[in-house]
Amino acid sequence: MGYKKYVNDYSKEYIVKPNGKPGVIAVYKGKYFRFTADEATLRKARISLGGLSLLSVALTVIPLLYKSVGSGTLYVALPHVIALFPLIHLLLGVHSFCFSKTPMIRERRDKTEGRTVSSAIAAACILGITSVSQTVNCILSGFPLPDVIYLILLLAATAAAGAIILLRGVLKTEECTKEGKKV
């Protein structure tokens, strides 16, 4: 059932379990949703959103794995590590999108549509702040090669998260029937 936000979407139904004891199950009574895009567009979007989110995470983690001045500087490393939290949340949203089935309940729609877009925006903003911090660090340290590579990887990760924001239109949903037909 999830969060308190979705409690009113369910009703309690009393049943008798196979072992003869009484039980309660939650039956969904809320609205159902489906994606507005066609199946071919959704298939392409699943590949592109999945690839971009994995690329963004990989390009964010790689600079933390080698020694550079930026990875040891607090004003660069702190926002860099903080950026991992919305990126993990982004991966969860993209996973929910990639494996969603029509029709979706309201909780699944919110996890797919809202989580992906908001996490991509947060990740792009934090990675952008980290890129600016790393640029300042490169200027102060004289542009050593490991720090320039660090900056390039951060800019590419920011661009990948920004591309997810641009593809958010494919995540739009509309209300449908329980069978997935348009209302």
Image: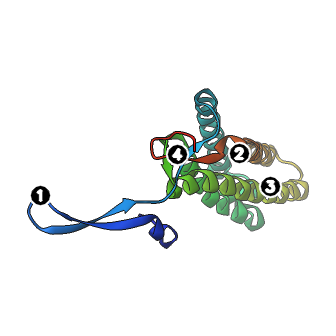
Q: CA distance from mark 4 to mark 2?
A: 15 Å
Residue 54 percent location from the top left of the image: 60, 41
Upstream in sequence: badge 3 or badge 4: 4
Relative to the observer, which residue lies in front, 19 or 132? 19
Residue 46 lies in what quarter of the image? top right
Crowding at mark 1 (Cα within 10 Å: few <14, some 14-19, many 20+): few
Residue at 64% from the left image edge and 36% from the top image edge: 37
Upstream in sequence: badge 4 or badge 2: 4
Numbered tag placed on residue 168 in the rendering: 2
Residue 69 visible: no
Of tags 1 and 3, the one toward the viewer is 1
**Looking at the picture, which amino acid does disc 3 mark?**
Gly
15 to the left or right of 6? left
Residue at 15% from the left image edge and 61% from the top image edge: 17
Residue that protrudes farthest toward the left in the picture = 20
Residue 113 percent location from the top left of the image: 62, 51
Numbered tag placed on residue 128 in the rendering: 3
Q: Which residue is mark 4?
A: 95
178 to the left or right of 23? right
* Contact flag, marks 3 and 2 (Cβ < 8 Å): no
Q: CA distance from mark 2 to mark 1?
A: 45 Å
* Contact flag, marks 1 and 3 (Cβ < 8 Å): no
